[in-house]
């Protein structure tokens, strides 16, 4: 099954993470599509694919600018997403924004679950204030996540 990585970003980090996954994990799935969220609406989830939402946080716990239309569509044009399976990578900065850490991604998680979609695995949070290298952390996580997702 095709993997679609939906990317919400302000300054490009989430896109670098998605591209690193696409380069590294291609041996585990038939195809990986990296799709910026710009211009998307809830209809993207009707495609037959496994989804990975990879988004940062901006403002005070807000979804990035290029993710706003998709997020608004999930809330404003709800439809049952019972067949949808997804994973979530939420980027943020725990030192600078402790009270709203990674909330942009967590908002997508809550909205998708409200519509009946099923999250596979735990949310991966990537903290810009930590020493970790986000691409390496995400690749290691994604290989385990994909194994879990493809097993059931
Ligand atoms: C103006 C601004 C507001 C931010 N607000 C938050 C926030 O509320 N919570 C959080 O966890 N991170 C916040 N961040 C941190 C970013 O989410 C983090 O640096 C992330 O890695 C950026 O990814 P991107 O380049 O894909 O947008 C903020 C960053 C900026 C520049």
Image: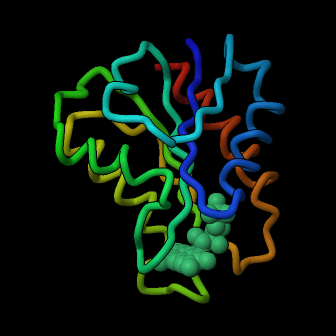
Front in this rendered view, residue 13 or 127: 13
The N terminus sits in image quarter: top right
Q: Residue at x 45, y 38 (%)?
A: 39
Give how far across and how far down residue 7 sits, in percent: 57, 44
Q: Is residue 39 above or below residue 59?
A: above
From the viewer's perspective, is 144 left or right of 74? right
Number of numbered discs visible in the structure rendering = 0
Q: Is residue 14 above or below residue 23?
A: below
Front in this rendered view, residue 7 or 126: 7
Q: Is residue 11 visible?
A: yes
Q: Is residue 126 visible?
A: no
Residue 30 occupies quadrant: top right
Ligand 1 located in image quadrant: bottom right
Seen from this angle, which residue lies furthest front?
A: 39
Give how far across and how far down residue 32 sits, in percent: 67, 23
User: Looking at the image, what colour scheme do you see?
Assistant: rainbow
From the viewer's perspective, is 86 left or right of 11? left
Residue 2 occupies quadrant: top right
From the viewer's perspective, is 108 left or right of 133? left
Q: Is residue 91 above or below residue 112?
A: below
From the viewer's perspective, is 112 left or right of 106? left
Residue 150 occupies quadrant: top right
Q: Residue at x 42, y 86 (%)?
A: 99
Give how far across and how far down residue 115 sits, in percent: 20, 38
Q: Residue at x 17, y 28 (%)?
A: 80
Q: Residue at x 40, y 26 (%)?
A: 44
């Amino acid at each position: 099954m095709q993997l679609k990585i939906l990317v919400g970003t302000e300054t490009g980090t989430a896109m670098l993470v998605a591209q690193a996954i696409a380069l590294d994990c291609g041996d585990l799935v038939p195809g990986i599509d990296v799709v910026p969220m710009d211009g998307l609406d809830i209809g993207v989830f009707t495609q037959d694919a496994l989804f990975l939402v990879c988004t940062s946080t901006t403002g005070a716990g807000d979804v990035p600018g290029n993710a706003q239309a998709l997020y608004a569509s999930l809330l404003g044009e709800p439809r049952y997403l019972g067949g949808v399976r997804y994973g979530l990578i939420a980027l943020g900065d725990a030192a600078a924004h402790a009270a709203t850490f990674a909330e942009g991604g967590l908002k997508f998680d809550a909205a998708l679950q409200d519509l009946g979609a099923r999250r596979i695995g735990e949310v991966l949070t990537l903290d810009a204030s930590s020493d970790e290298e986000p691409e390496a952390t995400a690749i290691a996580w994604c290989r385990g996540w994909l194994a879990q997702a493809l097993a059931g």
